[in-house]
Image: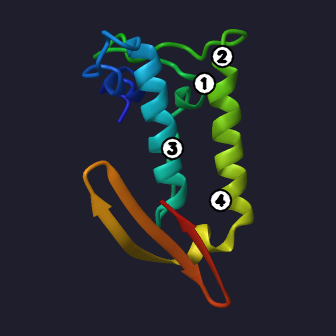
Amino acid sequence: SHDIERILTVLGEDGDTATQSAECIAEKRMRLMELWQMTMPGAPCIYYGDEVGVTGKKDPDNRRTYPWGHENTELLEWTKRLTALRRRTDALQTGRFIFLYADGDVFAYARVIEGGRDVFG
């Protein structure tokens, strides 16, 4: 929804800022979240600006304009690579989801297709 805080802002709120900035923590979490989203079943959804690091708190601060000329180009390139991976990998588009392992901070799964197997974890 457009009436909630931007995901990059939310992802940086409870990090250990004594060792890393909230922005650094948020971007690392964003990359993991995008990897998860692009490799899980279903249609991924990227809300405008998330791919370039738009931040914002609650309404009306969450409706910032696109940062033309000030995009986080590293995050944008990461998003482009993930969407390209999903487009060219049949298992990520139509493959079965198989849970493999979960313990603590580790969650592993596979996306499987007839005649091939791609594993992400």
- Give x and y (percent) for residue 27: 49, 26
Q: Residue at x 40, y 14 (%)?
A: 20
Name the N-terminal-most of marks 1 and 3: 3
Query: Is 36 above or below relative to 108?
Result: above
The answer to whether residue 20 is left or right of residue 57 is right
Residue shown at 36% from the left, 58% from the top? 107
Q: CA distance from mark 3 to mark 2?
A: 17 Å
Q: Residues within 10 Å of mark 2 (few under 14, many from 20)?
A: some
Q: Are marks 4 and 2 in contact (CB under 8 Å)?
A: no
In the rendered image, residue 73, in percent from the top left (x then y), is placed at 69, 22
- Amino acid type of the residue tagged 4 in the rendering: Arg
The residue tagged 3 is 34
Please give the label number shown on residue 23.
Answer: none
Q: Amino acid at mark 1?
A: Val
Answer with mark 1 or mark 2, whichever residue precedes in sequence.
Answer: 1
Earlier sequence position, callout 4 versus callout 2: 2
Q: Amino acid at mark 3?
A: Glu
From the image, tell me which residue sits under label 1.
52
The residue that label 2 is drawn on is: 71
Q: Mark 4 or mark 3: which comes first in sequence?
A: 3
Please rate how many residues cluster around mark 1, counting C-alpha atoms within 10 Å: few if below 14, some from 14 to 19, many from 20.
many
Question: Dots 1 and 2: beta carbons under 8 Å?
Answer: yes
Marks 3 and 4: in contact by CB < 8 Å? no
**How many marks overall?**
4
